[in-house]
Structure formats: structure tokens, C-alpha cells
Image (spheres, coloured by chain):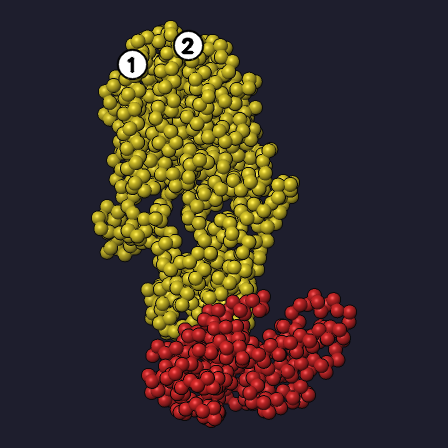
Amino acid sequence: MTSPEGPKRKKNRKRSKKRTPLIGTCTSSNPGEIIGEPPQRPTLVSSEVEALQVESPKSAELGNCLRQSKVTSPRKGPSQKPLCNTGSQKTEPLLSGLHVTQPKHTEIASGDPSKTALKVASSNGPVSTLFTLNVEQTQQRASKIKSSKTANTESMKITQSKIRTSESETQPQVLLEGKTKLKQVNKKSPQKTSSSSELNVAQGCKLPFIPVSELLVADTHSSSIPAVNVENTHSKPNVKEKNTSSVTEETHMPNLPPMQFELNTVIMSEAKNKLDHLCNLLDSIVIEHSGKEGYSTNTVIPVLVDQTAKGTSEVAVIPSKFESLPGTVSECQGEKTKEDIEHERKARKEAKAMKKKGGDKSKSENDKQENFNCIKVEKKKAVQQGKPLVVSAVTEEKLPRGKQEPSGSSVPSQGTSQESTTAKSKADLKRERREKQEAQRQAKMIAKAKEVEKQTKGQEQVHLSNDKAKPAPKKKKSAGEGAKRSRDRRIPLLGHLPLHFSQLPIYPVNCDDIHPAVRTLGLKMRDRIVDGSTARVVSTLAALKRFINDYRTPESCDLSRDLAEKLLPNVAFLNACRPHAIAMDNAIRFLKHKVNSIEASMPEAQAKDELRTAIDDYLQENINLASSTIASHAASLIDDGDVILTFGYSAVLIEVVEAVCKGGSNISVVVVDSPHPSSGVSMVKKLSSMSVTTYYRLITDVTHIMHKVTKVVVEAEAVMMNGAIQGICGTAGLALAAATHDTPFIVLCHTYKFCNNDLTDSLVINELGDADSIVSCPSREYFGLLDNWRETQNLNVVSLVYDVTPACLVTALVTEQSVLPTSAVPVIIRRNYADILGQD
Amino acid sequence: MKAYISTFLKQIESDDDMSPAIAAMKALMESLRQDDSTTLQEFIEKMKDAREALSDTDVSVVSVSSGCELFMRFITLKHLELEQAADFASCREILLRRGEDFIKSMEENRKKILRSSNTLIKDGMTILTHSRSRNVLAVMTEAAKQGRQFDVFVTESQPDCSGCRMADELKAAGIPCIVILDSAVGYVMERVTAVMLGAEGVCENGGILNKIGSCTVATLAHLKNKPVYVMVESYKFIRTIPLNNSSLPKKYLHRASVLKSDRDLKSAHPLVDYTPPQNLTLLYTDLGVLPTSAVTEHLIKLYT
């Protein structure tokens, strides 16, 4: 690393790491498994696989070598560890620790991947500083650990692969992970790139999809758990999760827009399901093994020969490759004996020595590996000899291309290498390679076509639930396709709204763009643990405050610029978890405005302090104080003996009722509720505990009771420029019923929820809720009748979250400023937010 | 009884053309001149008492209180300038000067309304009006002066028969008019081209508080798609939003003397009702011709 090109090398290495996971999954301990899958593989591949399988015993030897190398690795480790990934890395050690030391935990982890993931996520938490410590510990322990192979055949592959990864510090990783690392490298500091393989493995284990509740539970355990080997505990599902997470990470890359990100995940999942593509791609994966001696050489480097993959297309292709991995892994392992490895390593070293530039090591390795594979088929020795030369040529060529084409350039590079290196490669080899490349190209074309199809269908997200992860690839394929198709269904008129999936979305855990607090909040919001616009705004600002707390301005950067940029992925993450409420948009806009208005000359500490104070003030003024002011304003509108009707849960309304009761008035409250979700229950509970006469009814009954109601009071989610009220779905119907009975319709709203847009219907801006929840009928007679509604043509089930009440149905708008008519909204917006309105 | 209140009552009796709000402002000026307070704070406290005393008389409370509030708001508007004054004497000078200016400009208001409603009345129109409004009277008289030919229906407007007085004044101006029963509004409505109303107060949402029966007239007009125009000065804008008629404060509904008596208010006839903005078409004010939704903006500008 002393050479100036050090960082670049690192990047390359990581790239290569990505692919290693594939190798890991394939590890040949269970040749039978590999064979079992073949039906979908092309004949070409299968023959190769078989050949490899024969040699599989050698792979165990390799593994030993790797372990040894691993022991050595710790020296390197410390330097690399430091600031890399905040949450994810840290979590990893904890996770691994769980498995080893505490049998109970291991059980959980192996049996229920989601739970393990939970633990990991919880450990991710806030503290980046702890991370280094954990890493060191884990490394030491890792050295001690031996790979234990579980009886479970399915898990065997995975475990082996994991062992390898953990052992060789620098290298192996799943393709996807590797990519994420690449991205990191590209983005930022070299430190990140150097993260140890162990860490990577752990990262893979962490599952982003974990339900929040589980996470919470996991938190309690995590602190007590010592670090242990990652190897034993990993089960197949985990591996899959890894992949998905890595995929999502990729999507997070700054240059990819959020939409693409979702698409990519979808695509990835699909690709996984389809083995056919994978089989085609088998050829492209080359694994290179290096011996014990050098750290750099120790790495197991899988190479994807992906000529065409670039940008988004890359993502799509990757999953398929991943699936194909098992075959490739077995091949590589079977073929490589210790001798071979050593030989390779020596050759590589020579090559390295020759080029001091130290270009893309990984790429060169990839090329080597390709050559190696070919050789396997035909003649090993020839390949080995050829390697060094090829490598050198490749590295020189590839260096200029740099980071952005991780998997892509293998084909051209090979060609060039062959040309430049006159002596080694034989005509046969060339021919073979070309054939392979052709096959790969075809596979890619197919993959691309599929990708396009998927894109047109729309964004789809993947559930990473246990059942999905566990079943054999075949099952996935069939079930996955059906589910995909059904999930893709777009409802007429609402095609522009992001689809709702209760399990979604999947995100990379080890992506350091997203602060752990934001991540946690995102999951909570997705699971509706944090619900309601006010709660979401408060928690969002709190999370972003923590993010700002932990933020360090990189040198040579303006705080305002850099921070504003780094806010984006966090905000995007929240939006992906659940579309922003308008109030959240306003709050975030406010924060961005504050960030942007920080002068460059201001010291970081002061700037951060200012931001924190701004957030606190915002919460205090716009929410806390405003709520009590609203309550007193609204209480002045309510007289003794009134019958108030309200809808769902509203914290402000509770304050209003409190204020009214304090004023000595005797009122009764009718809480009208919608069945999905029935938030009114908690409202009723609170009201009745205040000894207020309370009635609870469903909104379907509202016309029965409206004539007895003297005032309808609801809370708005947002108020639009034209005075229209965005409320929880059902509010507009309530307003109509109130208007029919000439009952005053009072809306409570903080002015920070005022929105600079006009809205005349509830279709343009809205959010799709969980349609499945409304077809799940509790009554026995109709139970489950519509469970498969997605497969039914001409049937659309829609659950919208918001609706829009026109301004003319609103009698009065109670804000913290005063009781206003809806016509005052534009005035308020203009006066209060003139400074912020300009920007977006 | 304090001196300024007696002058206030006298003024209302003597000058029938003067709005009670203007009279109240003048009474406040009177009290300001006689004021012997030594600090600004004391002065403001005293003025507050004076306002309460004024609205405690048997006049239209709505416009008096809103006019007084606006007056106070205006003369004490730039606090800084007042505080920088050397002593309270000079401070009072400033207040007095401002008060005079304000009242003068308020007295100009009716002329501005006439200007804005200049083309409102056209030949051949049949106009229905309710009760007696100085502004409506002025607009009609002005139109008649310009030679416009139009007919007027005036409601009798019980309980004080102010409509009869209105009819007399219209006839004196040479405008043909017919007095109808309050209960005949529905019968007449189909022959009417427009409804013109005055107002004692304009709420923040653009609804008006006016002589009882206005709501009936406006609602019927709305039902028959007849435009309802309201002639009103901007100092009658008040910062409240009545949810409905039953939520009107009692001090608006009844005379102070009634409120003080032991009478059962349920059986007492209210003097004022609230017409929601949906039933109104346009407001002709000194600020120009406003839609009802524009009222809130002016109020927010004034008071924040």
C-alpha cells in the first residue's frame, strides 16, 4: 500500500471480493447439491462442473491454506479498519459473536435469518467509534475459528463460502458486496475500501429488512454477546439476504436515482429466481486462489466476466451471476490444488514486481482466472504459465479505466492481454475464451431484455422473508415469478404512486451513506410504528439531528455543501421506506434551507450547533408550542354541551378536549374510525381515561350519528395552497356528511404542514396503502375470498392513505396563529415561508 | 357617566349619517384629549376601559368594538416611535395626531365605497335591500344623482322598522321604492336583479354580521342565484370566524341593556345574524371590491 497506486489496488481487490461470495456458496464440500441443481444449466456448464466436482476434495485443502493466511491477516487489518463503515461493520462483529459464544443466539441466527439480521441491525446503532475495537476482536477470534460444517446440506455451501471469506482477510465477498465496496472506494476514502473480509461477511449477514419490533428485541441481546466466528452460523437464507442487501447498496450509489434503485432490487430478485440465466453466466465467473504467503495473494478472487454490464444493467446481470456461482465455485476449487495455487501466486508476484504501477490487481486476477478456467477444461499448466504475462498486460490496460467498470471490462482486457502477451496463451485457449465470451454476451442480452420488461412493469421490491430465502432455487423461480407478476399490477389512474409492500424495502445495511438512526426510523415508518405526520416529522428531525451530530466535514469541503449532499441519501432512504408526508417534506426543506444558509467560514462545531438549535427550535415552535396554542384556539370554538365528532387518532385533539374540560365545559366525543388502520381505538382509550363521554363508531355509521353532532373536529395531514385539506382517508367523506347536516367542520392543523401546492383531487398526491389488509375479511363467511385478488383480471383493490377535502367544506381552520378561513392559507404560506419557498 | 360617552351618544343621535364606529373613535379621541395619564402603559389601560364602556352602550356593538380596536391599533402602531418620545406629553401629541388622521381617513371611506361601486347600479335594475344601511343609501343616492333608473324593494326590517326609515330616505332622493314584509322576501326574490346589504361587521372568512334577517335575504338570494353585494367599510372587519349563528357571542346579539337585565335570553330577539360567505357575492369596501376570501388577508396584514 505504500506505493502511490495503493488505493486503486485496494479498490480493485474489493471488486474482486464481491464475487467471492459466489465462490463461497459453491464451495465444493457438497458436490451432490451442485449436481442436483443442474437441470436448468446448459450442458456446457454442467460438464465443467462435473470435472470440477471430481477435484473438490482439494478445496478443503485450500480452505486450510486460507485459514492460515487469515491468521496472518490481522496485521493488515488494523490499518484498514478505522472509520470505514459506521453501523454495518460494527454490527458484524457483534453478530458473529452471538453465534459462537451463546448457543441460544446461534440457534436463532441459523434458524431464523431475519432474526439474526435483526440483531445485526440493532448493533449497528449509533456508535462508529466502537467499530474498530469490535473488528479487532473479531479478527483474533476468527483466526481461532475453524469452519464447522453443519449437517444441513443447504447451509453447507454457504458456510464454506463464508469460511473462506472470513479467513482470507482482504478478499472474498459476494459480487454485490464487492460492488458496494467499489462504490465506497469511488466515493471516498481509501480506508473504507480496505475493510476486512470478515467485516464484509458480517455485513452480508445483516439484513436490512428486519421488522423493527424484532430489531428492538434484538438490541437487548446484542450488547451481551461476544464476538464469534461468522462461519458456523450462516445459513443459506443469510447468504441470499446478503446478496440482496448488497444489491441495494449498489443502487444507493450516488449516481443512481432512487427510482432506479428500486427497480434494480426488483430486477435482482427476479434474476435470482431464474437459474437459466445464471447457468449461461457460469462460464464468466473465474475464481483465482492464491496461497498462504502474501496477504494480497491470499485472497480468493472470483471474477465475473461481464463484458456488457454497465450502470444499471450491471445490477440486473449480477444476481444471475450470483446464482450461477455454485457451479463456478466447485469448478475452481476442484481444479486448484495447493500446487496450482502456489504456482499462481508466484506468477502473480512476479507480475506485480514487474509493474510498479500496481494497477487493477483484481482485474488482472480476473483475467488470470479466466485463463485459468479455460485451462481447467483443457490444460492447467499452460494456463499457469500464461498467467503472469497476461496479468501484467491486463493491469496496464485496465488502470486508466479505473473504478467504474468493476465487472465489465474482462473481455476486452483478455483480448488485449493475449495480443500483448505473445508467448503464453495458445490458440486453443483463445478460441475457448471467445466461445465463452459469446455465450456470456448472449446471456447478457437475455438478461437485459428481461430487465427491460421488468422496468416497464414497474418497480418491484423483494421480500426477504425467511420462507423466500430458504426454498430451493427452483421453487423460488416459479413462486417468485407469479408473485412478481401479481405484485407488479398497477391500478388504473394510480400508476404513478409507488406500490405498497409491507415487507419492503430492502436496503444494504453496510451502506455508510445512511445514518443508523435514519435507518432505524425508516424501518419504523415502514412498519407504521411511527405513524401520523406529526410523529413522523418529529422523529425525522430527531434522526437527522443525530446524523448531523455524527457528521464530520471532510477536509477541503464546505460543511453546507457536503452536508446537504450527504443529507440526500438519508432523505431518500426515508422516502423509500415510506413516501414522505407533506409535513416531512416541509421539515426537511426547512433543514436543507438551514444547511444551505450556513456560511462557509463558520467553524464546524458552531455550524452543527446552529443546526441542532434550529431543529430544536423548529420542533418547539412549530409542534410543541403550536399544539398547545391550537388547543386553546380550538377550545374557544367549543361550547358547553357540544357533541364533538372526530376521526381516528389525533394528539392535538386530545389536547383540545383537555383544554375544553379544563375550561369547565362538559362535552362528549364521538370517535369515528376506519377499520384500516383503526387508530381511533387508542383515541377512545385516552379520552375515556379522561372521563369524557366517548362513543366509538366506524365511519360507515357516521350518517346515523351526524345529526346529533354539533361540531366535527379533525386533524389535517396537510393543508394545500388552495385551502384543500389532505387528511387520512375518510376525512373527505366525513366533511361531506358534516356539510349535509350543516355541521361545522373544524380542521386542526399546524402551519408547518401548509403546502405550497394546489390539490384538487386525491389522486395526484397520495400514497398506496396495503391493499391486502382491506381484503382480509375477518368474517368467517368471506374469509380469504379475495386473497388472490392480484391474479384476478379486472379486479383492482386499492387502499389509499390520504384523501382531499375541498376548501368549501371546511368551516374553520385552527392553526397556532389563529382561527382562519381556508382562504388564509396562501397568505400564511407567503408570510411565513417566503424565505424557504424559493428553494426546493 | 363619563364625558366622552355622553358625547358619543349625543353624536349618534344628532348626526344620523355618522357610523357608530366613527362616533366611537371620536369619543376615544375625546377621552384621549382629556386623558391625564403619565405613562403610555397607563394610557393604553385607560383606553381599554373606554372601549369597553363604549361597547357597553345600546349601540351596534360589532362595529363599535371593531372600529375602536382598529383605532387603537393604528395610533399605537409604531411603538418604537412612541417610546422614543421625550415624555408622555409629546407622546400624546403623536397619538392625537395619528388619531385625527385616522378618523379623517375613515370618514373618507364612504366616498371610496361610492367610487368602487360607481357602476354597480344600472338602469332597469330591481334591487332588494334589507333594513337601513348608510352605505347602501349613499350608493343608491349617488346612482340616482347620476340619473340611473332603478327600483328598490326595502324590507320592513322588524323589530325597529328601520326599513321604513330607509324607504323614506330613498323616496326623498327620488328613488322609487316599495316596503315589503320581512316574510315576503321569498315572494319578491324572483323579481329582483341584485341584493344590496350593509354590514355591522365582516368576519375573517368574509361572512357578515348584520341586522337580523340579512341571513334570510342572502340565503334566498343565493338559492335563486341573485348576486348579493355588501357595502361595508374596512374598519368593520373583525377577527373572528363564527362557525354558525348559534356560536355568535351574546354581546353581538343583544343590546347591553338586555344583557344586563334578567330577561331570559332565549326568548329575547337577537338583533344580529351571521351570513356565511358562501351566500355573498362581493364586498364593496374602501379597499376596493373584494371577494369574501380576501378579507382574511387584510386582517392578517392589519393585525400581524
Q: Amino acid at mark 1?
A: Glu
Q: Residue at x 59, y 91 (%)?
A: B13
Looking at the rendered structure, which numbered label has been put on residue A389? Answer: 2
Q: Is residue A303 left or right of residue A9?
A: left
* Chain at numbered mark 1: A
Residue A752: image location, x then y, percent:
51, 57
Q: CA distance from mark 1 to mark 2?
A: 19 Å
x and y, in percent, of residue A280 in the image = 28, 24
Whether A336 is drawn above or below A685: the answer is above
Residue at image coords 50%, 79%: B114
Q: Residue at x 48, y 29 (%)?
A: A186
Percent of width and height locating residue A88: 49, 34
Q: Which residue is mark 1?
A: A432
Under tag 1, what secondary structure?
Answer: helix
Q: What's the amino acid at mark 2?
A: Leu
Is B62 placed above or below A252 here? below
Q: Which chain is red?
A: B
| Label 2 secondary element | helix
Q: Farthest left residue?
A: A793
Question: Which color has been applied to chain A in this rendered view?
Answer: yellow
Question: Is the residue A141 above or below the residue A836 in the image?
Answer: above
Say how many tags the image has. 2
